[in-house]
Image: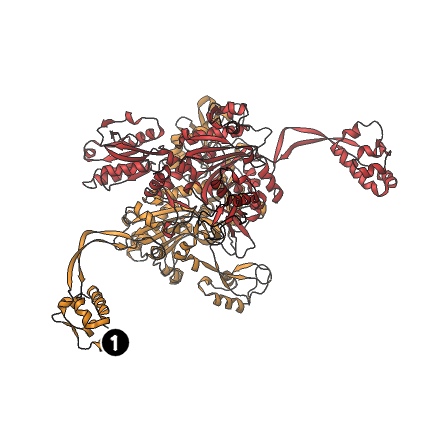
Chain colours: A red, B orange
């Protein structure tokens, strides 16, 4: 079995995830998390929230998944969130035209081509329908918008869309969020929740879903002054696969301290450098194998026009590199668009430390002079004079003599009409005033780390997957970090009788009350019960046996080594906490017992 | 201001909730949770999860919000999830026809009438359009399906719907969930997540949303044998507003111990009684005012045909009673429908305690005898004989003689054809075998408590809203329980200088690391900072001042009384934990200081 088949099979058998509504044949691109998967996902989300919202001091919000059309007119999704679609004339199936081209040729990144070019290549190579073998050569390649569309209320007057990203729910509320931040930059807002992408023909299971979970952080900064606390992470070693390394004969991944990467300009934005560094620690903590992980910089062609520096966190699974997180410096693109389209103020008023005195130049042309002299052109000339006063006051200020009209106006018609004419300075009434400004309105720039939670879950399970042999039997287990394992401790009675089950049930309930995720299991042999917990990645199991009644001890078993030790029930919660936090090693607790 | 206006205004000002995308004019029925609201919601959901999933030992799953059409064909939502729609011919606005009738007449529950009856009443009362005053009398009243519709993939071949309840995501996966439960009833599955209802014209803010959050529990039971642990809750006093009390001259709410209510039959299902009791404790814990709370039984006409006992938890807000939770005994309706429509097995194989021996009767008619004798009727006669053996074996068993064909067959044609003919018993080869059955397939019954989280949030904030006077100034605060308050403790430096800010920042970070929700604030006077925390319901605030440097103490202030006491920083996390858990009273910590 391939790595993917192994993980998918385990995921189904043990309740991590499976295709939704298989009883009805399923629908591509939709998956359901079973009990273990939902718990793992919740733990990963909590860890994300703790690191990227709480520790960073950012606000978390929750906005609806359905949003009205004007939001996506402004964001650009209505116009540009497309994939290339080709439909088979024989069987009616739909395909991503660029993927067909990539599969049939050596080409990569066919997405970057125009639909007509793709249609040309399909015709040239006489590419056939993968579903039925029908000819696609003469079929048109269209643009298919990837937002799920619906209608809000009866009729079609108010279209709504399932959000393609959680970010827009943050951007549209910026006028309110800046109030909660008391107009102080930088500040950040996060959101965890569903997002949608109506893929033409999804493949790859949990890696490319039509409905998925994003965790996004939008940091709003003043690009002139705000700097990240890079000093906190300067020595974090980042596995970077820079644009240069990709194009320059593929030098591969180079490991560089975060501080150096920013200083040398490999990472252009210090904020991006900061986020890569704290993300690396986060990935490590939740069990991503850093030997199968890299940060890849976007090549020029991959970036949106407004994004100046973009990196992806990528993990290797199933022999492919998949994107876990996108990091983008988005400039003021998002807030500028909403500021233009919406009826609200998306700027922040930035107070200066000290009020700034600036000079304001004005003219007040004497129309009783200009009028008679220039007739119908007098008004044009007057407003041109005002414009110049604002744009280039020096021209008036430094003039020692009357000004020739052709000097003033960059306008062939007026130049030829009034060649040689001079405007007397004393008829212009030029003045300079001192004005005190206390601050200015600015559109914050946005830095966005955008995490795909489902891919992260898939990666974490895949990287934790282990097979070994135990007492001559093959075993599968998940080496999940204790902090995110769906269950932290299994509690078993040796047998479901003689009061062992009551004693074990009580113990399970006590540990639950102490805040641990506990699985109680009394069904089948102890060996089978251990195997079940191994397969869902439970770090420790406790067994209550007849000795427990005598000496108030239980057996604790370690998932990874299958080693067993005997420990007192008294102080158990503290001991488990120490094991979970890594403050104590398993080899150092209680006394060793022979393996089962 | 009305209670509703006060709460809505506070919610906006302090970041609890507000209408989505107000910068674009907003859309009725969609709300966004700001930072304090999202934190409160998360805490309420965690409390729900702890009580209804973890403590009950149920599994939690997470399924997509978009589901394919066949699911809703089976569930009945495609056919019956409708509201009555009337459109104004003048202005084109849409209205709920039954609501117009209720507003214009004394009628309640107009929803129960047929569309034609509603149209009749609108004509009779000459009801006008509430938007423009246009005449609605001759307009048709239609059925509008409340599911948001979309298309999965390109084209319209695969319609999808935003789920109207989280429950269907559980029901469709029953064949897999029962495996995770190892085919043992009872077991429960829960889900917390978005659900959708495309209201014709939503009103009442957070109380009637088009997108809302549900927390649902589906308990699967064997109705013959499974009983709840009612003994654990038997003395919990339930405020019941039974169907009898509602119809019998309105006796009002009667407070009855859960055990008595089940025993007397007021609550028909012991499971419903159990869930009402544990819910009451949950509501109390998260701050619902039990003096503004009741359980109301559905009247006969309100119930779905398959639901035998239905109650709602209702809270009084804004002078109305609103439904917080629905409790329904749904029989085997849900699983039976999916078992019929889907290509999978929705039954549970229930093993008997002891295998049961039953008798199985078979015949093996001698065709070499029947064939020549009855010609083309021989086959019919043989299969009739087999049918009888299965249905009524006694006929053969007790027969002492050959049997007359007319006795065997209830068929006039054959009777007249073979009148007087006898079938010899020895040509039938009748046999009785003993068969051992180890169990049987059964469709579990479902008990469903279904919580609306947004209404609960709205109720909790409304019930916590307080105004008082403090040192001659009016004050607003939220008396939220510490367990769900968005922030548990505010940390302030007396002033943002002289190292007070660094000391307070360190303290805030230490408390965050200890797991508390902390707000650090250094802006404005201490009084203003207290007021800000009062308005978001923060139970305690700590102030670092110059004395802190000398004696390592801080001032702690209690939200509800505004009383202040001086406490040492050493042991602070333990002290705060005791306060949060209610293990220690504020009056008993440290030493009193004069009010600010």
Please provide percent x and percent y for residue B208: 48, 52
Q: Is residue B493 visible?
A: no
Quick check: A37 left or right of A439? left
Q: Say which residue appears at 83% left-offset and 41% top-offset.
A: A377
Question: How many C-alpha atoms fall within 10 Å of the one at disc 1: few (<14), some, or many (≥20)?
Answer: few
Indicate the position of residue B33 as horizontal and vertical percent values: 49, 43
On screen, B40 above or below B346? above
Q: Is residue B237 left or right of residue A213?
A: left
Q: Choose between A116 and A509: the one closer to the eye.
A: A116
Residue A95 visible within the image: yes
Of B390 and A517, the residue lying toward us: B390
Find disc 1 in the rendering and name its residue: B413
The residue under the point 46% across, 42% down is A193
Q: Is residue B58 left or right of residue B519?
A: left
Element marked by disc 1? helix
Residue at the extreme right: A372
Residue furthest out toward the top: B550
Q: Residue at point 25% right, 74% down?
A: B411
Along the line of sight, the residue nearer the viewer: A109 or B34: A109
């Amino acid at each position: 079995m391939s790595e993917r088949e192994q993980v998918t099979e385990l995921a189904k058998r043990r309740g991590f995830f499976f295709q939704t509504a298989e009883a009805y044949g399923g629908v591509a691109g939709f998956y359901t998390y079973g009990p273990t998967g939902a718990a793992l996902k919740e733990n990963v989300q909590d860890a994300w929230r703790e690191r990227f919202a709480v520790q960073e001091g950012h606000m978390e919000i929750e906005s609806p998944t359905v949003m009205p059309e004007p939001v996506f007119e402004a964001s650009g999704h209505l116009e540009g969130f497309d994939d290339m679609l080709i439909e088979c004339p024989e069987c009616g199936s739909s395909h991503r035209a660029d993927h067909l081209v990539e599969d049939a040729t050596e080409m990569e990144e066919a997405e970057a081509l125009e639909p007509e070019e793709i249609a040309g290549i399909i015709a040239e190579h006489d590419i056939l329908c993968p579903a039925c073998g029908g000819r696609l050569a003469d079929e048109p390649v269209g643009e298919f918008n990837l937002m799920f569309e619906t209608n809000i209320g009866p009729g079609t007057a108010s279209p709504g869309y399932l959000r393609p990203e959680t970010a827009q729910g943050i951007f549209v509320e910026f006028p309110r969020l800046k109030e909660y931040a008391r107009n102080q930059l930088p500040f950040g807002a996060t959101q965890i929740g569903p997002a949608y992408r109506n893929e033409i023909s999804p493949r790859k299971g949990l890696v490319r879903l039509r409905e998925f979970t994003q965790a996004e952080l939008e940091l709003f900064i003043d690009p002139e002054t705000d700097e990240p606390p890079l000093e906190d992470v300067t020595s974090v070693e980042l596995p970077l696969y820079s644009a240069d390394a990709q194009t320059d004969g593929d030098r591969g991944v180079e490991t560089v301290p975060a501080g150096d990467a920013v200083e040398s300009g490999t990472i252009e934005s210090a904020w991006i450098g900061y986020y890569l560094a704290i993300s690396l620690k986060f990935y490590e903590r939740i069990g991503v194998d850093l030997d199968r992980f890299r940060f890849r910089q976007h090549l020029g062609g991959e970036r949106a026009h407004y994004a100046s520096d973009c990196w992806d966190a990528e993990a290797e699974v199933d022999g492919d590199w998949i994107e876990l997180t996108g990091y983008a410096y988005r400039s003021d693109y998002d807030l500028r668009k909403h500021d233009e389209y919406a009826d609200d103020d998306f700027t922040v008023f930035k107070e200066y430390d000290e009020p700034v005195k600036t000079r304001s130049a004005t003219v007040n042309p004497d129309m009783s002079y200009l009028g008679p002299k220039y007739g119908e052109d007098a008004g044009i000339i007057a407003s041109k004079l005002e414009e110049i006063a604002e744009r280039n006051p020096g021209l008036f200020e430094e003039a020692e003599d009357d000004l020739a009209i052709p000097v003033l106006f960059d306008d062939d018609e007026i130049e030829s009409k009034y060649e040689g004419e001079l405007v007397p300075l004393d008829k212009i009434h030029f003045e300079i005033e001192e004005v005190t400004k206390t601050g200015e309105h600015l559109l914050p720039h946005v830095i966005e780390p955008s995490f795909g939670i489902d891919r992260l879950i898939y990666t974490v399970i895949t990287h934790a997957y282990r097979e070994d042999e135990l007492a001559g039997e093959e075993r599968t287990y998940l080496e999940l970090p204790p902090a995110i394992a769906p269950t932290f401790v299994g509690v078993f009675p040796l047998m479901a009788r003689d009061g062992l089950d009551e004693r074990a049930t009580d113990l399970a309930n006590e540990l639950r009350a102490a805040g641990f995720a506990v699985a109680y299991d009394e069904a089948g042999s102890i060996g089978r019960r251990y195997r079940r917990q191994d397969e869902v990645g439970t770090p420790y199991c406790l067994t209550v046996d007849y000795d427990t009644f005598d000496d108030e001890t239980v057996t604790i078993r370690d998932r990874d080594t299958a080693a067993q030790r005997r420990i007192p029930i008294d102080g158990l919660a503290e001991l488990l906490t120490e094991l979970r936090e890594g403050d104590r090693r398993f080899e150092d607790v209680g006394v060793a017992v022979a393996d089962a």
